[in-house]
Image: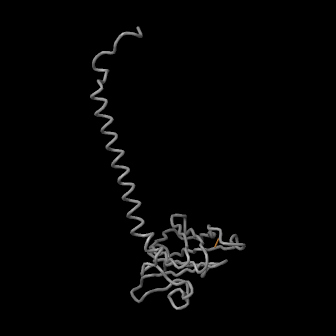
Amino acid sequence: MPNQPLPAHQTLDHRTIEKYELGWLLISVVLVIMLFAGVLLSMVGETVPGLFGGKSSYIDPAKLNQSAFAVPGLKTAPDGSLDAYIVARAFQFQPNVLHVPAGRPVTMHMVAADVVHGLMLGQGNVNVELIPGQVSTFRATFNHPGTYTSQCHEYCGIGHQTMAFKLIVEVAK
Ligand code: CUA
């Protein structure tokens, strides 16, 4: 019986449909506004200071030897906290082997000296784009002892494929 009208409780009159449409329209407008605000905030908060030399994150690549990057590697502060300094330059990471103790937070400071390089650390949940003059700083805790090899993942020139890095997470003593 294809032409029989649907029972009343199965039909929607146009006013009800318009209510639903209005609801979904509002939801999508809110999502668009959130997306716009998010992009704007991230530009103002991170990207812009990076591009125009925010004091805390910019370093003149020509003056790395006058900074903490002069002697790259892991450093222990007097209070016992750990800082690792890594410089990427064509075509090596300095240091190219970094030993860190397992389970202890390490503040990583990374920078490129010449062109853009990239590095993934540990099991892959740390992935940094290294931009000349832009210091990337983050804290990471490597919980699983082991040796993790990675490779520069931004094409940086003729020796790009030889630019390797090894992170050795050691059992804490
Ligand atoms: Cu460094 Cu590719």
Q: Residue at x 57, y 80 (%)?
A: 87
Q: Is residue 160 above or below residue 6?
A: below
Q: In the image as oriented, which residue stretches furthest toward the front?
A: 52
Query: Of 54 and 65, which appears nearest the observer?
Result: 54
Q: Quarter of the image holding residue 164?
A: bottom right
Toward the top, the furthest residue is 1
Determine whether, in the image, residue 41 is placed left or right of residue 95: left
Q: Residue furthest right?
A: 158
Quadrant in the picture for the N terminus: top left
Within the displayed image, which quadrant is ligand 1 positioned in?
bottom right
Q: What is the x, y in percent for residue 28?
A: 36, 45
Question: Which image quadrant for residue 107?
Answer: bottom left
The x, y position of residue 112, in whole percent, is 57, 78
Q: Residue at 72% x, 72% y: name it.
A: 158
Residue plotted at (38% across, 64% down): 41
Q: How is the image coloured?
A: one colour
For image coordinates 36% across by 49% down, the residue present is 31
Residue 173: image location, x then y, percent: 49, 80
